[in-house]
Structures are given as structure tokens and as C-alpha cells.
């Protein structure tokens, strides 16, 4: 009895020891920085408490002129909406292309599955900056894509510096984060359930609609989260592929940071984080409700 | 009686391995038919052919006179109760049962009525809103049955549905399944490797081995008149000895000539003789037709199970008389306790208890079950 107790105790000790490095890491590089972000967001240069930074995010205005004239806009809200729009488009494209791909991969032979998943993951092993530069050379007006198009005798297209280029970059970079969680849910799905559905009167569409889709929703939700969050806060892709014309919320944070406006940069980061967390909480609740039915 | 399903000359192989070898089987309206056999005998594949998950390499599946070899499962008026139930985890009990009705776009009110009717049939009234993952094995089993019956199929296929339940529950469910079959009048095709289950539930038992049907008959026929040594051994305990048919109703084995009730064999035809352990009477050695020495004696409550060595061949005998190990006893066998079978490929493989011990037998069963699980996991090719 005493032996058993002490062995349980030593097991717990080992577990704690194993966790220790991660706990320290998490405290140093996740918790402490978050506290600093929040602290900076709500203080001024003299480190007195203030709501100015947050207020500035919602109220700062600037004038924009386009074909219909000059308008006053709320600068950061506009930037935020633009980021949200591009991130949503990218996420949607990732989902629409990634979902069927994940399904097809999960249905193929074990060997093919391994190869496909490796192929999807290989780009993730390359540096993010290099990947983005690669897209610059592909999409440039005199780049590889247009070289190819003119070889075919077609008119070259202008992509670099447009929203399309930014979306292409985001989709390329974050696509694996969509496909992997969906694939892992589908690969674990009990094939008997699909047989049961067919047995009970479902054709292929019915099986997809009534069994595969609802059961894969947890994967879909985590895929959406994992693509939406980084693409809404990206700054590098928009600078390189958008030629800096599409100032996104990530660019705004970076810009303020570089300009040494640490407190305002922190405020933007903080607000963005709160909005994202709220979105994720809503999605999680929706997912749980589906699961509970 | 009306034929519902006919399997005609069906052969099926996976990766060059023949799983079903020229199967012919008629399934009649309203009957409880059991496919019985050890793992790997092809019983589950037969079921999957009827369900439409597989199609035969050779031969035809006929449903009410119509060939349905390539009709997909969702167009067949046949439903399956899967071994591990395959309930939809994202739907509650009510929605699981309503699943096939929603697919058929049945009116809402009718769905409500039918689902409640089915849940009442399987004694799950009040469980409508429960999550299927919170149910016990027996309850999940009932939901699976209700779901498979709700759209009133002509035939219900049950793939070892009781295998995952514990003994007590299994006995209850056997009774209940039989009752449901009687109440609904739907033809049941039941797959099992448990001979007791097959005998107690079925109208017709189909014994299978190595992809071939060994015998089709009522439980009583199968037990009393086994066709060959495999059937005799698989269904219950049997002493199977080599014999020679001298003439009609006269057979010689173990150095003695016995009266029996079988006829129609050739003159001096070698045969397999089956004597069930409970059909042998123990008498004093000098009065016995056969004489032997008791080598083991096990008390089983209702009776003793003893092993008797008769000229090197070990017989199993179940008796209520007490005997001592090493005691010399005589055996007396009534003519109708002797069953004569023609020689088959299974002759000489079964029916001798020389290596028998209860413990071994139990280990054997456990191993078989473990093997079964492995086979099931690998039998069905992944994906389509």
C-alpha cells in the first residue's frame, strides 16, 4: 500500500517536472508579454493610466480622396474592416478548396495520404519571407506568371499590388492550417457511420450533407480559426504583394511600433486580440451547440 | 412460403483470396435466419452482399424476383444493424431513429409518431432527447435496432449485434430480438459465431465454413442430423468415430456392431459416426457394448463431464452418475442416439477428445474472439 502511494506520488512528481520547462516558457513568452501589451495599451508615455489609446483607435479620422471626392473616414476602423475583408476572403477560399481536398485525401490509400500530407506540409518548412518573395517574382508584371501567359499569346495580367495578390499570398501561406485539422477529423471518422448512412437511404450527397459535414465541423472550426487569425493580423504579405497600398491592421501595428508609438501599437494589438477572442468564443459556442444536439 | 432473397452461385474474393465459394441460399418471408460459422467463414461478407456494400464476382442476388447485384444500398429495402451499432454521435436518440425518415422526406407528424412507436418497441420511451454517446451498450443496441426498423424494411440484417454485450444482457436481447421479429413480421438475417445463440433464436440455421455453406436446416435438424464432421463438431459437443456401414440400420465402429436408424448408404461404405455426449448411458463394464477407462471427471453442476478412453480414442460423456477416474465402465448406446454421416473433407479433424481440457477450450474461445476482432478490422477494405 505504502509502496503504491509513493509510486503514485513519484509519478506525479515526474509529470510536474516534465511540464516545468513548458510552464516556464509559457510564463516568460506568453503570459508576461500579454501583460505588457495590456499595460502599454492603457498607459501613456509617462506610464499613467489612460484610455486615450483605445479611444484613438475608434475615433481617429483621416481624409480619403477617390473618384467620388474627398471623404473623412475613421482611419483604424477602415483599416480593420479592410483586414477583416481580405482575411475572410482568404479563409473562405481556403475552406472551399481545402475541404474537398481533405476529404479526398482521407479517402485515399494510407500511402497516398502520407505523401499528400507531406506535400502540403513541405512549404511550411520554408521560411515565410522566402515564400512571400517567391510570390513576388511569380506575380510581378514581368514575372514568371506573365512570362508564361505571354508565351501562350495572351495579354499579361496586372496582379502585384492588388488585393488579389494579397489574397493569393494569404491563401498560399495559411492553406495547410485549414486542410490539416479538417483532414485529421475526417481520417478519424468511423467508416461504419458512412455505411450506416448509405444503408439508411442516403445517396452520396446525403452522406456528405447529413453525416460527414456535421461530424467534420470541429475540424472546420479550428481550420477557420487557424487561418482567420493569422491572416487578419498579417502585415508582411500586404507590404510585399500589395506594394504597401493595402494598409492592414498588422501594418498599422508595425508602423506605430517602428514610429516608437509603443502605447498606441499595444492598444491596437490589444483591441484586435479582444475582437478575435470574442469571435472565437462565439464560434466555439456554435460548435459546441452543434455537438450537443 | 414466399422467397424474399435468393443468392445464386455467388463467389466473391478479396485480393485473390476466395471468401465465398459458390453460395446458394434462399431466404423466405418472415423467417429468422442465422448465418453461423467461425470467423473468416464468409458470413459477414454474405450479409454485406445482401446489404449492397459489396457486389458478387460471380452469381446473382435476387430480391423479390429482381436481380439487384449493382443496386446501391440506399435503394435496397434492406437495413442493417451494425456490430458496433454505428450510431450518429452528432444526433440524439430521436434524430438517430428519425434519420431514414428525414431522408425520405416523411411528413413531420408521421416522423414523430413512427419514431415514438419504434422507441416504445425497443423499450426506450423517454430517451428521445438523450445523447447516444451517454447510453449503455444495450441501449445503443436498441437505438440501432429501432433506427433500422423505422422505415419498415423487408429484411433486417444483423451483424453479430450481441457480440459486444455481456452474457446476461445478451440472453435478454436474444429473447427481445425474437419478440421484435415476431411482432414486426420482418425477415431477420442474423450473423453470429455463437452456436447456442443460433440454435435458440432461429427458424433456419445456415452453417458456414471456409466460404461454403455446410448445412441449412432448422436448429433441431442441424443438431440431430449434422451433415458432416464440421457441423457436428461446431454445433455442440460430439464424439465422431470412424465406422463402416454394414447394411441399412447396421453400423460397425470401435470393434462392435450397433443397430442404428440410418439407411441408404452403400455396402461397407466408410462413414463418420456421431454420438452426442448426453446420449450415452453408463453401465457396468461387463454389460457395456463398449468398454473403457475413465481418464478425467469434471463436475459441472447439472451433470458430470467425463472423458473415457476406449481403445485409445477418447470419448466425452455427460452423465449424472458418479464415476471414479481409472474406473472401468461400460457404455450403452441406443440405436437413435447414433447418427451416421458420409465422409467429407472434415472427416478425422474433429470429434476426438484426447487433447481436451476445459481450460484449453476456454482459451480457444478467447483466442477466437480476439482473432475475430482483428479480422473484422482488416476484413473490410478501407475506403471505397
Image (cartoon, coloured by chain):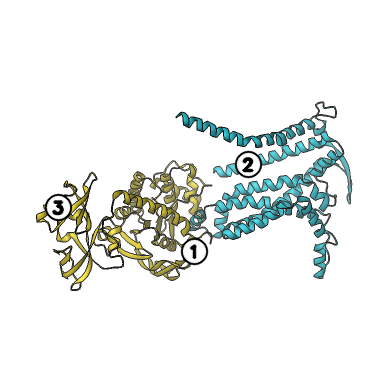
Task: Farthest residue to the left: give it.
Answer: B286
Task: Farthest residue to the top: give it.
Answer: A48
**Whole-Å distance between the Cαs marked 2 and 1?**
38 Å
Along the line of sight, the residue nearer the viewer: A293 or B378: B378
The image position of residue B206, as x and y in percent, is 33, 61
Please state the chain letter of the residue tagged with numbered disc 3 in the rendered image.
B
Dot 3 falls on a residue whose secondary structure is strand
The image position of residue A24, as x and y in percent, is 68, 34
Among the 4 quarters of the image, the one containing residue A134 = bottom right
Q: Report whether mark 2 lies on the same chain as mark 1.
A: no
Dot 1 falls on a residue whose secondary structure is loop
Q: Colour of chain B?
A: yellow
Q: Is residue A96 visible?
A: no
Q: Which residue is mark 3?
A: B329
Residue at image position (79%, 32%) is A41
Q: Residues within 10 Å of mark 2 (few under 14, many from 20)?
A: some
**Whole-Å distance between the Cαs marked 1 and 3?**
62 Å
Q: Which chain is cyan?
A: A
Q: Which residue is mark 2?
A: A284
Q: Quadrant of the N terminus of chain B?
A: bottom left
Amino acid at each position: 500500500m505504502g509502496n503504491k502511494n509513493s509510486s503514485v506520488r513519484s509519478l506525479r512528481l515526474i509529470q510536474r517536472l516534465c511540464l516545468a520547462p513548458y510552464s516556464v516558457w509559457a510564463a516568460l513568452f506568453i503570459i508576461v508579454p500579454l501583460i505588457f501589451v495590456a499595460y502599454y495599451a492603457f498607459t501613456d508615455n509617462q506610464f499613467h493610466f489612460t484610455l486615450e489609446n483605445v479611444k484613438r483607435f475608434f475615433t481617429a479620422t483621416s481624409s480619403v480622396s477617390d473618384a467620388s471626392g474627398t471623404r473623412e473616414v475613421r482611419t483604424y476602423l477602415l483599416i480593420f474592416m479592410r483586414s477583416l475583408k481580405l482575411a475572410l476572403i482568404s479563409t473562405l477560399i481556403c475552406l472551399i478548396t481545402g475541404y474537398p481536398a481533405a476529404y479526398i485525401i482521407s479517402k485515399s490509400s494510407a500511402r497516398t495520404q502520407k505523401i499528400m500530407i507531406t506535400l502540403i506540409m513541405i512549404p511550411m518548412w520554408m521560411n515565410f519571407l522566402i515564400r512571400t518573395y517567391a510570390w513576388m517574382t511569380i506575380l510581378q508584371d514581368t514575372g514568371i506568371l506573365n512570362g508564361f501567359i505571354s508565351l501562350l499569346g495572351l495579354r499579361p495580367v496586372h496582379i502585384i499590388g492588388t488585393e488579389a495578390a494579397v489574397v493569393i499570398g494569404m491563401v498560399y501561406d495559411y492553406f495547410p492550417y485549414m486542410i490539416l485539422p479538417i483532414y485529421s477529423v475526417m481520417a478519424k471518422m468511423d467508416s461504419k457511420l458512412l455505411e450506416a448512412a448509405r444503408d439508411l437511404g442516403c445517396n452520396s450527397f446525403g452522406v456528405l450533407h447529413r453525416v460527414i459535414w456535421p461530424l467534420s465541423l470541429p475540424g472546420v472550426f479550428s481550420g477557420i480559426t487557424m487561418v482567420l487569425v493569422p491572416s487578419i493580423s498579417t502585415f508582411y504579405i500586404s507590404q510585399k504583394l500589395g506594394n504597401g497600398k493595402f494598409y492592414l491592421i498588422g501594418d498599422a501595428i508595425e508602423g506605430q511600433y517602428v514610429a516608437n508609438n509603443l502605447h498606441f501599437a499595444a492598444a491596437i494589438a490589444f483591441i484586435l486580440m479582444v475582437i478575435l477572442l470574442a469571435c472565437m468564443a462565439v464560434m466555439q459556442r456554435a460548435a459546441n451547440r452543434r455537438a450537443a444536439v | 412460403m414466399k422467397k424474399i432473397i435468393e443468392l445464386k452461385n455467388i463467389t466473391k474474393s478479396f485480393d485473390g483470396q476466395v471468401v465465398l465459394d459458390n453460395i446458394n441460399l434462399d431466404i423466405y418471408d418472415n423467417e429468422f435466419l442465422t448465418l453461423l460459422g467461425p470467423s473468416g467463414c464468409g458470413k459477414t461478407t454474405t450479409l454485406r452482399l445482401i446489404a449492397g456494400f459489396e457486389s458478387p464476382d460471380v452469381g446473382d442476388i435476387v430480391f423479390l424476383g429482381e436481380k439487384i447485384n449493382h443496386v446501391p444500398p440506399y435503394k435496397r429495402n434492406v437495413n442493417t444493424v451494425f456490430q458496433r451499432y454505428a450510431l450518429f454521435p452528432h444526433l440524439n436518440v430521436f434524430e438517430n431513429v428519425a434519420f431514414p425518415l428525414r431522408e425520405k422526406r416523411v411528413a413531420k407528424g408521421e416522423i414523430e409518431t413512427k419514431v415514438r412507436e419504434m422507441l416504445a418497441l425497443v423499450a426506450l420511451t423517454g430517451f428521445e432527447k438523450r445523447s447516444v454517446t451517454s447510453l449503455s451498450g444495450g441501449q445503443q443496441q436498441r437505438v440501432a435496432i429501432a433506427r433500422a426498423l423505422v422505415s419498415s424494411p423487408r429484411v433486417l440484417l444483423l451483424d453479430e449485434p450481441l457480440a459486444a454485450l455481456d452474457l446476461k444482457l445478451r440472453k435478454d436481447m436474444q429473447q427481445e430480438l425474437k419478440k421484435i421479429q415476431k411482432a414486426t413480421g420482418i425477415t431477420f438475417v442474423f450473423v453470429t459465431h455463437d452456436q447456442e445463440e443460433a440454435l435458440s433464436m432461429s427458424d433456419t440455421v445456415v452453417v458456414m465454413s471456409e466460404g461454403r455453406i455446410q448445412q441449412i436446416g432448422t436448429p433441431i435438424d442441424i443438431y440431430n442430423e449434422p451433415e458432416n464432421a464440421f457441423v457436428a463438431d461446431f454445433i455442440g459437443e460430439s464424439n465422431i468415430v470412424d465406422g463402416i456401414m454394414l447394411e441399412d440400420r447396421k453400423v460397425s465402429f470401435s470393434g462392435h456392431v450397433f443397430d442404428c436408424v440410418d439407411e441408404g448408404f452403400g455396402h461397407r461404405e466408410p462413414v463418420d459416426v456421431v454420438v452426442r455426449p448426453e446420449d450415452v448411458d453408463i453401465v457396468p463394464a461387463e454389460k457395456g457394448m463398449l468398454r473403457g477407462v475413465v481418464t478425467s471427471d469434471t463436475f459441472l453442476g447439472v451433470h458430470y463431464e467425463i472423458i473415457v478412453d476406449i481403445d485409445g480414442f477418447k470419448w466425452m460423456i455427460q452423465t449424472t452418475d458418479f464415476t471414479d477416474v481409472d474406473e472401468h465402465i461400460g457404455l450403452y448406446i441406443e440405436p437413435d442416439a447414433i447418427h451416421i454421416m458420409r465422409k467429407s473433407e472434415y472427416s478425422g479433424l474433429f470429434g476426438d477428445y484426447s487433447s481436451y481440457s476445459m481450460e484449453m477450450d476456454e482459451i480457444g474461445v478467447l483466442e477466437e474472439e480476439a482473432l475475430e476482432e482483428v479480422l473484422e478490422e482488416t476484413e473490410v477494405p478501407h475506403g471505397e
